[in-house]
Amino acid sequence: MKKLFILILLFVNTLIANETKIELTTTYDEFQDVTWIEPNFDNYEGYPIIYAYIGYQNEEYWLRLVAQYKSSDWIFFEQLILLHNGIRKVIKFNYSQKTSKVVSGGIYEAIDIQVDADLLEYLEDYSLSTNSKLRFYGDKYYADRDIGEFELQALQVVINKYKELKK
């Protein structure tokens, strides 16, 4: 039954979601017995600054949010500040859960956080805005990024899929 469900998810999620051109990819991790549903960024130029993905295990679904910073200079960001239409959302997290490393061509910092009901509500509006921004905020430095239409559409598609699965 579980394998049938996963096969159905694989089929459905490889279809083009909504009318956007954002495809969702479903993968199954047999070692952790977890199914992951995430946007396919293969045709995206560059890297997504922000995106969401869904986890599924034992008939439980959860939503996660990833924010990635790549540059030649460290920010050592300690929080994220989302902004759309003048509405701010500060996201604090456990700094030890952040990834920081040197990569080819510069540095990479990222955080992967659980999305609660409050953040989900904010992200729904954020993904629909035409003026969404993200600030990687550190003690001494910060970097601002405009969120592109493709990333916002991917966020919408994942949120819609998550809400559909939670019904």
Image (cartoon, rainbow, N blue to C red):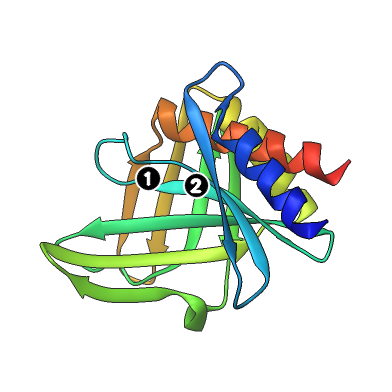
User: Residue 97 at x, y = what percent?
Assistant: 51, 78
The residue closer to the viewer here, 167 or 12, is: 12
Residue neighbourhood size for the residue with mark 2, other residues' Cα within 10 Å, grouped as few (<14), some (14–19), many (≥20): many
User: Residue 90 at x, y = what percent?
Assistant: 58, 55
Residue depicted at 38% across the width and 47% down the height: 49
Q: CA distance from mark 1 to mark 2?
A: 7 Å
Q: Is residue 126 visible?
A: no
Relative to 129, say whether 49 is above or below: below
* Residue beneath disc 2: 51
Relative to 49, say whether 124 is above or below: above
Q: Is residue 130 visible?
A: yes
* Element type where label 1 sits in the image: loop
User: Residue 146 at x, y = what percent?
Assistant: 37, 36
* Element type where label 2 sits in the image: strand
Residue depicted at 52% across the width and 28% down the height: 153
Q: Amino acid at mark 2?
A: Tyr
* Residue reaching furthest to the left: 105
Residue depicted at 32% across the width and 57% down the height: 69
Q: Tell whether 158 sits left or right of 107.
A: right
Residue neighbourhood size for the residue with mark 1, other residues' Cα within 10 Å, grouped as few (<14), some (14–19), many (≥20): some
Residue depicted at 33% across the width and 40% down the height: 42
Locate the C terminus by quadrant. top right
Q: Amino acid at mark 1?
A: Pro
The residue closer to the viewer here, 165 or 87, is: 165
User: Residue 93 at x, y = what percent?
Assistant: 57, 71
Locate the N terminus by quadrant. bottom right
* Residue beneath disc 1: 48
Q: Which mark is residue 118?
A: none
* Residue reaching furthest to the right: 167
Labels 1 & 2 near each other (Cβ < 8 A): yes
